[in-house]
Image (tube, rainbow, N blue to C red):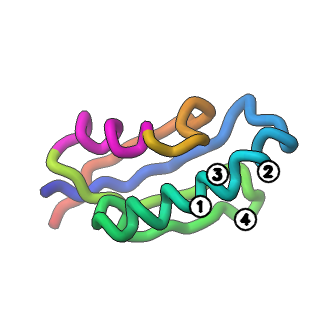
Amino acid sequence: MQNFMLNITLQGLETETRMQLLPQEQAVVKELETKGVILHTFIKQDMSGVFMVCSAENEAMLHEQLALLPYYPYMKIELSNLRA
């Protein structure tokens, strides 16, 4: 498994849509935490996105898991590989 640091910014997500999707987003995040995909989450001070530490076999598998998130289509993701 590889660890990744993600800098995620939400773009083009209206407040109303964001609030409607929030309960489902939180449920999927909890599921990914339980599966060991999401290791740590830090919400940005301005609430424009999050920093995440994630674990996956590779970058493609990570994106496959993240695509389950309702906010995924609105995410700009900067990804860095981390050393173990």
Mark whose residue sits in front, 4 or 1: 1
Q: CA distance from mark 3 to mark 1?
A: 14 Å
Q: CA distance from mark 4 to mark 1?
A: 18 Å
Crowding around mark 3 (Cα neighbors within 10 Å: few <14, some 14 to 19, many 20+) is some
Which of the labelled discs sits on residue 45, or is there none? 4
* In this view, the mark in front (3 or 2): 2
State the extent of the magenta-drawn residues as a range.
58-67
Secondary structure beneath dot 2 equals helix
76, 83: nearer the viewer? 76
- Name the residue carrying label 1: 26
Tag 1 secondary structure: helix
Quadrant of the frame with the C terminus: bottom left
Residue type at the position of mark 2: Met
Q: Position of residue 15 (x, y in %)?
A: 85, 43
Q: Which mark is residue 64?
A: none
Specify which label sits upstream in the sequence, 4 or 2: 2
Q: Amino acid at mark 3?
A: Gly
Q: Amino acid at mark 4?
A: Gln
Residue at mark 1 to residue at mark 2: CA–CA distance: 11 Å
Q: Which residue is mark 3?
A: 49
Residue occupying image coordinates x 33% and y 47%: 80
Q: Earlier in the sequence, mark 3 or mark 2?
A: 2
Q: Amino acid at mark 1?
A: Gln
Q: Circle 1: is it few (<14), some (14-19), or many (20+) Cα within 10 Å?
A: few
Q: Find residue 6 and report its horizontal and vertical position in percent.
A: 43, 51
How far apart marks 4 and 3 lie (CA) works out to: 9 Å
Question: Which label lies toward us, 4 or 3?
Answer: 3
> In terms of sequence position, does the residue under pointer 4 or pointer 1 come before the other?
1
